[in-house]
Image (cartoon, rainbow, N blue to C red):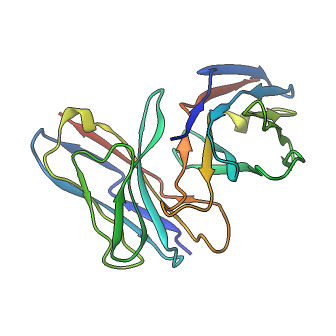
Amino acid sequence: AQTVTQSQPEMSVQEAETVTLSCTYDTSESNYYLFWYKQPPSRQMILVIRQEAYKQQNATENRFSVNFQKAAKSFSLKISDSQLGDTAMYFCAFMKLFNNAGNMLTFGGGTRLMVKP
Amino acid sequence: NAGVTQTPKFQVLKTGQSMTLQCAQDMNHEYMSWYRQDPGMGLRLIHYSVGAGITDQGEVPNGYNVSRSTTEDFPLRLLSAAPSQTSVYFCASRNPTVNTEAFFGQGTRLTVV
C-alpha cells in the first residue's frame, strides 16, 4: 500500500513571496503519477499540477512548480508570487498505474496555507 | 456541462438513521469513487467502481454500501449512521483512457448526532 505524508499542517506566507509545501510518499511501484490539489474554502477540489514518475523534468503551471525527487520519494510544491487567492488547503496525492484497482488516489493529510496581505 | 453533481450539500442525521448520498456525472466516465475527508487525514477512499455493475472496497468501507447500475450514477448508502461517520464526503470520476485527472463533486457535509 502507498502512503503520502505532508509534514506541515499549516503554513503562512506574505503576499508576493514564495512558499514551498512538502510531500513525501512511500511506494514500491515504479509507474505512478503525483498530484497537488487545492481546496479553497468553497470545498471544491481543484487540480493544481501533476507529475508523471517516468519524467525527470519537473512540472510547472504558471506560478506553480514542483521539485520531484524520485529516489528520495519527495514531491514538493513551490508557489511563486503568492496571491491572496492561493489561501487554501493543499493536498498531495499519489496514483499508481497499470493495475486493476481503478487507479484511485491516495492523499496526504493536507497543508493549510494562508497568504497574508 | 455539469461535471460531477453531489446531493445533498449538507445533511444532519440521527444515530441509527440511514440515508443515500447521491452522485451523478455527465462526462461518461468509467471510473467513479467515494472519499471521506477528515481533519488531518486527507481524503480516504471508501468505495470505487471501474464501470457499471462493478464495485469494490477502498480503505474505509465499513458502514457504507454502493452500487453502480448506470455509468452516470454512483450512490453511497449509509445503512445505520454513527457519529464516526461525521465527515465531508466527495464523489469523483475519471476517464482512464483520456487522462489522469479526477473530477470531484462539491462535497456533502454530513453530521451524525
Residue at point 64% right, 45% down?
A: A37
In the image, is A20 to the left or to the right of B77? right
| A21 w.r.t. B16: above or below | above
Q: Which of B72 and A104 is in front in this view?
A: A104
Residue at point 33% right, 72% down?
A: B68
Residue at point 86% right, 34% down?
A: A80
**Residue A41: image location, x then y, percent:** 55, 38
In the image, is B92 to the left or to the right of B12? right
Q: Residue at the right extreme?
A: A57
Q: In which quarter of the image is residue B55?
A: bottom left
Q: Nearer the viewer, residue A32 or A92?
A: A32
Residue at point 22% right, 43% down?
A: B12
Q: Quadrant of the C terminus of chain B?
A: top left
Q: Quadrant of the N terminus of chain B?
A: bottom right
In the image, is A87 to the left or to the right of B15? right
| B83 w.r.t. B26: above or below | above
Asked whether the viewer can see residue B20, the reply is yes
